[in-house]
């Protein structure tokens, strides 16, 4: 498996933002992630693909220490952000999560107004000096989340009253409002129609200019469309990691090939 | 037959019915249970329930109705001029009941024969003395009308009981026979049992509801009695609570209401922050081990009887407060603000302690019900734990927490023992928490204990107070429900 990451490295000319080495994750006695090495580059979209239950969400949550909130979860190995070990006792997970934002698999708007949902992060981190600036952040985030037109007349309505797909875009907008350096997106388009999906993909591409994005997806086409790097997980193992073009046209591992062509999963 | 044995017999009959029905069904199917429409035990249950449920229902209704019917018949026998000044027909009727019970006791102890009981009259026997011999003390001489009413009362009760036994037994046997005969391999016993069970559940639910209605109605009647003797204006809008037995009492609820609310507010000021913070700690911060022993410990507080809290108020908290705020030069502060151990603060503090587990365990459940994904969303944006709690978890749990607080408030308002022992007995309007004050519940207790005569406004006022208290807590509960619904609509 090591030679595969080497393949990734050989073609790499960009900076490495997050680097994971020998990561193991256990839920109690369940070994959910087995010895995974991945490098996430800046200004790159990395896609995680793989069959349901293979550990994509679990690994994604390791990258901003969201697994800390699960009592039985144990993470081993080394994960560095800009060369700094994020599991070091000195690191404040709260600050880490401000830098590494996350959109969850299930939309989870707060029981607050749409406006307050978006303003939540900026308020906590003091990103706006006054109300006008905050308004601006909210509008910009909602526009980038491709939901502004639908909600601009009812910013005071509760975010929980939106449809599933709208909630998902609201959560995307909420995550980018805090201007994270890395954005982790767990199936951000699972409840979206093709138009909204296209808008979100456009957003992802735009975000790539300044950040790195990691996206978990079950859609091969989407992975092929938006990502530059692809990692294929299977039963907790990282089977193959490399340039998206190569993974989809010329996979090295037979498992990758059968998954992409729809024979396992 | 005493009712107890009647009920036992009913159950025995229905148990027998179960086995009979089951057997007959199996027989009809030639011993092969697969031929039956339902499982064999359903046929048994069908027979058992058909014999039990109607009979039991009639029994219950009869037990309630018979005394009422007898009462109204017998009370018609008592002429109006027999009712003394300032008492009511109900009082005379209770004499009648006592005499009737006395006669029963006399028979049971062998002091009188049955015939004698039915034939004695006040002309040739001193009934009061005779009953006194068997231990039934009567307040006054027995009038002849009262005696004959009592005799009539006894006779009617006896005939009623006999008829009740007959009717119930016939119903049970008829039900058993009917269901037994209907039992056949194609009979849909399962569906019938389903209906029977529905009836049984309905019966239980209606008993619960009817009891509530009964309680409210009885309070209502006594309250109306009170308002016929005492002006409602004084009760609701007067300013003084000064009962006396000379007939010119001032009975206003306002000073009592003030004391009640004041003490409740103090109690909530103690219980809500502590209970809520404890709940937040337990549900958001505490590790599994801490939680597993801290939560039961907190709940032990909820199991302490309120009288023990009352003792705590009287013996520990009150004197401790006096030590701080009273005793002049000898006190800790060197002031003379508090003279006795009983005060609003004493009762309020202790009641607050009593309510802590109530608030905390309800809030804990509610906070735990907030989905973890909501917390994840906030933590994922780089919020700290306390920011998450304050801005996401608490707002999401707010309706439930408000409900919990209002429930705690209605408990505080209705609490009796702690205020009886800790609050004092002086009804007044005062803002000073170190003064003794009294509450509605305390006054109800004191108006009804000791020598009571249920005809004076000083006693009957207890019912008016009780009803007001009931309306108050009911209103609070409805308001709590309203708030909970309103928030739910907004956030679901
Ligand atoms: N909180 C948890 N407690 C225990 N086991 C868990 C927990 N979360 C995930 N797992 C286990 O870890 C494994 C990986 O789960 P994960 O959610 O990462 O899968 P996934 O690849 O994201 O699947 P999907 O595509 O369906 O979202 C699964 O076997 C799952 O049962
Ligand atoms: Mg997942």
Image (tube, rainbow, N blue to C red):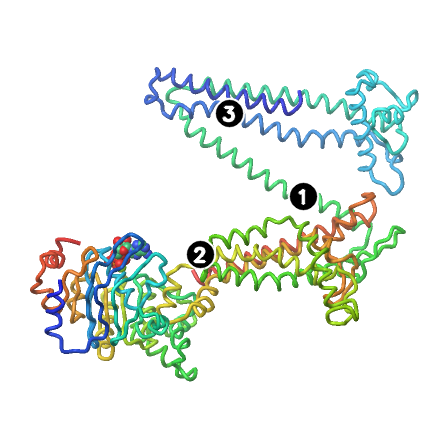
Ligand 1 shows up in the quarter that is bottom left
Q: Residue B50 carries which label?
A: 3
Q: In this view, does A12 lie to the left or right of B140?
A: left
Name the residue tied to disc 2: B369
| Circles 2 and 3 in contact, beta carbons < 8 Å | no
Answer yes or no: is residue A242 visible.
yes
Circle nearer the viewer, 1 or 2: 2
Q: Do labels 2 and 3 share a chain?
A: yes
The Cα atoms of the two marked residues, 1 and 2, are separated by: 36 Å
The residue at 45%/23% (across/down) is B44
Name the residue tied to disc 1: B215
Q: Is residue B247 above or below residue A244?
A: above
Q: From the top left corner, tell me how far across and down residue B482 is, in percent.
A: 54, 58
The Cα atoms of the two marked residues, 3 and 1, are separated by: 32 Å
Q: Is mark 3 on a helix, strand or loop?
A: helix
Q: In this view, does A182 lie to the left or right of B424?
A: left
Mark 1: few/some/many CA within 10 Å (<14, 14-19, 20+): few
> Viewer-proximal residue, B117 or B131?
B131
> Viewer-proximal residue, B251 or A157?
B251
């Amino acid at each position: 498996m090591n030679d595969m990451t080497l393949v990734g490295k050989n073609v790499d000319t960009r900076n490495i933002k997050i680097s994971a080495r020998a990561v193991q994750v256990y839920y109690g006695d369940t070994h959910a992630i087995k010895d995974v090495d991945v490098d996430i580059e800046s200004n790159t979209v990395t896609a995680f693909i793989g069959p349901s239950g293979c550990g994509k969400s679990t690994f994604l949550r390791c990258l901003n220490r969201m697994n800390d909130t699960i009592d039985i979860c144990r993470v081993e190995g080394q994960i560095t952000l800009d060369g700094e070990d994020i599991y070091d006792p000195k690191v404040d997970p709260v600050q880490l999560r401000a830098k590494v934002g996350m959109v969850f698999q299930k939309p989870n708007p707060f029981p607050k107004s749409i406006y307050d949902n978006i303003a939540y992060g900026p308020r906590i981190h003091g990103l706006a000096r006054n109300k006008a600036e905050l308004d601006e952040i909210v509008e910009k985030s909602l526009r980038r989340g491709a939901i502004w037109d639908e909600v601009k007349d009812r910013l005071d309505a509760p975010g929980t009253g939106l449809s599933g797909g709208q909630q998902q875009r609201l959560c995307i907008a909420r995550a980018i409002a805090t201007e994270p350096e890395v954005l982790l997106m767990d199936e951000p388009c699972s409840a979206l129609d093709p138009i909204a999906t296209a808008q979100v993909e456009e957003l992802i591409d735009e975000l790539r200019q300044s950040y790195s994005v990691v996206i978990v997806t079950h859609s091969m086409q989407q992975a092929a469309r938006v990502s530059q790097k692809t990692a294929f997980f299977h039963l907790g193992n990282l089977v193959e990691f490399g340039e998206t073009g190569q993974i989809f046209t010329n996979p090295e591992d037979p498992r990758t090939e059968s998954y992409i062509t729809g024979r396992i999963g | 037959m005493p009712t107890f044995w009647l009920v036992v017999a009913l159950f025995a009959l229905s148990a027998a019915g179960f086995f009979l029905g089951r057997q007959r069904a199996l027989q009809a199917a030639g011993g092969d249970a697969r031929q039956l429409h339902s499982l064999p035990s359903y046929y048994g249950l069908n027979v058992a329930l058909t014999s039990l449920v109607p009979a039991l229902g009639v029994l219950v209704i009869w037990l309630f109705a018979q005394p009422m019917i007898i009462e109204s018949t017998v009370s018609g026998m008592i002429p109006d001029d027999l009712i003394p000044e300032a008492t009511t027909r109900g009082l005379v009727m209770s004499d009648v009941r006592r005499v009737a019970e006395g006669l029963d006791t006399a028979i049971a102890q062998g002091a009188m024969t049955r015939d004698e009981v039915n034939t004695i009259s006040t002309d040739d026997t001193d009934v009061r003395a005779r009953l006194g011999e068997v231990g039934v003390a009567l307040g006054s001489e027995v009038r002849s009308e009262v005696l004959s009413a009592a005799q009539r009362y006894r006779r009617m009760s006896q005939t009623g009981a006999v008829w009740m036994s007959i009717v119930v037994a016939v119903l049970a046997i008829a039900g058993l026979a009917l269901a037994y005969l209907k039992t056949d391999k194609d009979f849909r016993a399962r569906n019938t049992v389903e209906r029977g069970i529905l009836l049984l559940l309905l019966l239980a639910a209606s008993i619960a509801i009817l009891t509530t209605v009964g309680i409210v109605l009885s309070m209502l009647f006594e309250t109306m009695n009170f308002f016929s003797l005492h002006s409602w204006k004084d009760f609701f809008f007067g300013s003084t609570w000064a009962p006396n037995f000379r007939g010119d009492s001032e009975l206003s609820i306002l000073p009592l209401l003030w004391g009640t609310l004041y003490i409740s507010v103090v109690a909530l000021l103690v219980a809500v922050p502590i209970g809520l913070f404890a709940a937040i700690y337990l549900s958001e911060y505490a590790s599994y081990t801490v939680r597993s022993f801290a939560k039961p410990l907190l709940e032990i507080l909820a199991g302490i009887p309120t009288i023990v809290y009352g003792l705590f108020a009287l013996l520990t908290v009150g004197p401790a407060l006096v030590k701080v705020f009273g005793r002049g030069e000898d006190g800790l502060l060197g002031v003379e603000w508090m003279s006795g151990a009983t005060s609003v603060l004493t009762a309020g503090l202790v009641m607050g302690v009593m309510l802590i587990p109530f608030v905390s365990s309800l809030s804990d459940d509610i906070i735990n019900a907030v989905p973890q994904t909501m917390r994840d969303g906030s933590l994922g944006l780089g919020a700290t734990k306390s920011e998450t709690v304050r801005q996401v978890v608490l707002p999401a749990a707010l309706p439930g927490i408000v409900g919990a607080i209002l429930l705690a408030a209605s408990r505080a308002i209705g609490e009796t023992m702690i205020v009886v022992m800790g609050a004092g007995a002086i009804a007044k309007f005062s803002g000073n928490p170190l003064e003794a004050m009294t509450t509605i519940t305390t006054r109800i207790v004191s108006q009804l204990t000791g020598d009571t005569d249920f005809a004076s406004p000083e006693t009957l006022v207890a019912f008016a107070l009780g009803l007001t208290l009931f309306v108050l807590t009911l209103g609070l509960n409805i308001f709590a429900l309203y708030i909970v619904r309103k928030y739910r609509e907004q956030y679901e």
